[in-house]
Image (cartoon, rainbow, N blue to C red):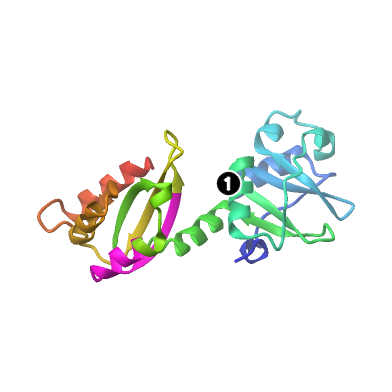
Amino acid sequence: MIAVDLIQDDIPLLNLSDDISTAVTFFNDYKLHQIPVFGASKFLGLIDEEVVLNALPKSKIKDLKKYFRKEEVLSEKNLFDVLHFFSQGNLSVLPVIDKDNNYLGCIHERILLQKVCEILKVENPGGIIHLQIRIIDYSLAQIAQIVEGNGGRILSSLCLTNSSNSKLIEILIKINQEELSGIIQTFQRYDYKIIASFHKNLHKEGLNDRLESFIRYLNI
C-alpha cells in the first residue's frame, strides 16, 4: 500500500482569491484542521484552521501566504512514511504529489486510521499479548513458533522501543484465539516478560470488562 492508494476525493480546496469566510465555512463543514491552497493551478501549501480564524474578517487567503505549510508526500511513499508525516506535522490531511510536483489529492487521517486498523486486524476476533524481551534474544520466528505450538496464529504484530532501557524491545501481537493462558505460560517459560494481555480468561472477567480495560490501557 502506497500514498496514492489512500487518497480521498472529497477534501475541499481553497484558492488565493477566496475570502476568509469561505475558508471558515469549509473548516466548519468538513471538520478539518488544515485545507490545501491553490494558486495558478499549483499546490501552494496547507493553511491551518487557527490561522484562518485569527485573520481579519475582510482579508483573503492570499493575504496569509506567509502561513502556508509546505507539507506533502510523494505518491509512491509507503504507509510507514505517510504515518511519519502525519505524526511529525500534526496533520488532519496530507497532500499527495507525483514526481513532477503535480497535486494528486489528499489523505485524510480517518482513512489512514481505517487502513492501519485493517492491517492490524483490529476487527478480527482474538486476544492481544504485550511482550518484553532483550533485543539480543528477539526472534519473531520463535514468537510465532510459541504461538503456533499452542494452536494459535499471529494475525498482526508491532515492535516498540523501550523508553527506559535501550537493550529491551517490546512486542504487541494479535492472536486468533480468545483464550491465551497456555500461550502466556509458554512465553513465560521462555523468559518473556508479559507486560499486559487482553483475552478471554474463562475464569475471570467478562467481555465488556476486558474491552474497557484494553481501552484504558491504550489511553483512548
The range drawn in magenta is 143-159
Amino acid identity at mark 1: Lys
Q: Residue at x 72, y 46 (%)?
A: 71
- The crowding category of the residue bearing disc 1, from other C-alpha atoms within 10 Å (few below 14, some 14 to 19, many at least 20), is few
Identify the image quadrant of residue 76. Answer: bottom right
Q: Relative to residue 187, is residue 152 depicted above or below?
A: below
The residue singled out by tag 1 in the image is 31
> Which of the 4 image quarters holds residue 162?
top left
Identity of the residue furthest to the front in this view: 136
Indicate left or right for 145 with 42 as reference: left
Q: Which residue is rendered at x = 26% and y = 66% of the image?
A: 177
Q: Position of residue 97 (x, y in %)?
A: 76, 58
Quadrant, the N terminus: bottom right
Q: Nearer the viewer, residue 117 or 48?
A: 117
Tell me what residue is drawn at x 80 percent, y 44 percent.
18
Image x and y of residue 120, in percent: 43, 61
In this view, the residue in front, 88 or 148, is 148
In the figure, is residue 212 to the left or right of 99? left
Q: Does 144 lie within the magenta span?
A: yes
Q: In the rendered image of this protein, does residue 154 appear above or below residue 40?
A: below
Is residue 104 among the parts visible in the rendering? yes
- For the question of whether residue 92 can be seen, the reply is no
Q: Nearer the viewer, residue 17 or 36?
A: 36
Instruction: Please state the horizontal and vertical placement of residue 134, each as a whole percent of the image.
Output: 38, 46
Magenta run includes residue 76: no
Taking the view exactly as shown, the residue that stands out farthest to the right is 40
The image position of residue 163, as x and y in percent, is 45, 36
Relative to 139, residue 88 above or below: above
Element assignment for label 1:
loop
Q: What residue is at 77 percent from the left and 39 percent from the top?
A: 68
